[in-house]
Image (tube, grey):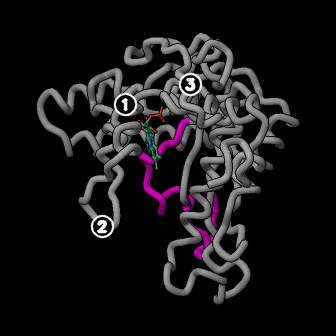
Amino acid sequence: MPPRGKSTTVADALPAQWRRGVYETIQRRRDVRIFRPDPIPAAALARILGAAHHAPSVGFSQPWNFILIRNLALRTRIQAHVDKERLRAAAGFSGERRTQYLSFKLEGVLDAPLNICVTCDRTRFGPSVLGRHTMIDTDLYSTCAAIQNLWLAARAEGIGVGWVSILRPAWLRRTLEIPPKAVVVAYLCVGYAKSFPRRPMLETAGWLPRMSLVETVFAEKWGQPCDGALARILERASGKSHAESEDNVDGRGRAASKPDRTRGGPDTGQPRSGGRIA
Ligand SMILES: Cc1cc2nc3c(=O)[nH]c(=O)nc-3n(C[C@H](O)[C@H](O)[C@H](O)COP(=O)(O)O)c2cc1C
């Protein structure tokens, strides 16, 4: 084995501060439903859309489009549709669960100054896309990768994004005049957030818990847990941020300071491992 610090992997790693920025952005991203009305500067929006456009895509097909929606009358119609669908969806829950569902704010269509409908053109670059023959939905997965890039870049800019799926794609297609070749993948509310809570709202509210990481990882076949050093690290790391995990970015196993992130509360904007990666 090459000595630590000399392997290709480490040589290709980004500088510690950059790596830290990536992991912190991932940890601090939240689905945002409460926004300030301030408009998003064009330059920041362009950077966020540029991040989306640099996502991986099957066969480099770049199947996405981004419909920017600012018009208040249009957003008011969309809000009315969401309200109706939210009530319909409530029927799928009963008793206290329904009451709790109805108490949640699940979108910011009108609060956010900008909404973005993300579509996937299923015909882009013709019928034969490299890599899509056996997995036909890889164009949709590519579009989701673009959305995640957008979401993370927005967070880095201090801008919140909320994904709203409580609407009928067919209705939205008609409303936004989306052609049959394109699929509605996401409807996003975008704007400066009132806050970025440390934990997902649905976790804080007790709707669902975050699963332990180790339970989600199998070895060699479905259902077989991984073992050894990785299993022990994953068990300890479950629910912690990257910076808090014991073997973090530099791989030297130096423990970062460990603030209590098991509780909710606002993101203070302070680094979570005392300002250093390792
Ligand atoms: C495909 C997709 C659809 C979603 N739809 C909604 C939605 O309609 N309303 C909502 O409040 N959150 C929605 N969310 C956000 C999730 O509730 C949220 O990501 C999850 O609770 C974890 O919280 P976090 O994003 O803050 O980490 C959606 C997320 C995804 C990925």
Marks 1 and 2 sit apart, C-alpha to C-alpha, by 23 Å
Which residue appears farthest toward the left when viewing the image?
Answer: 95
Q: Nearer the viewer, residue 157 or 165?
A: 157
Query: Mark 2 — residue?
Result: 221
Query: Mark 3 — residue?
Result: 254
Q: Position of residue 242 (x, y in %)?
A: 53, 31
Marks 3 and 2 sit apart, C-alpha to C-alpha, by 32 Å
Q: Nearer the viewer, residue 32 or 37?
A: 32
Query: Mark 1 — residue?
Result: 236
Q: Position of residue 9 (x, y in %)?
A: 69, 51
Q: Does residue 35 sit above or below 265 in this rendering?
A: below
Q: Is mark 2 within 8 Å of ligand 1?
A: no
Mark 2 nearby-residue class (10 Å; few <14, some 14–19, many ≥20): few
Q: Which residues are magenta?
A: 162-184
Dot 3 amino acid type:
Arg
Mark 3 / mark 2, whichever is N-terminal: 2
Q: Quadrant of the C terminus?
A: top right
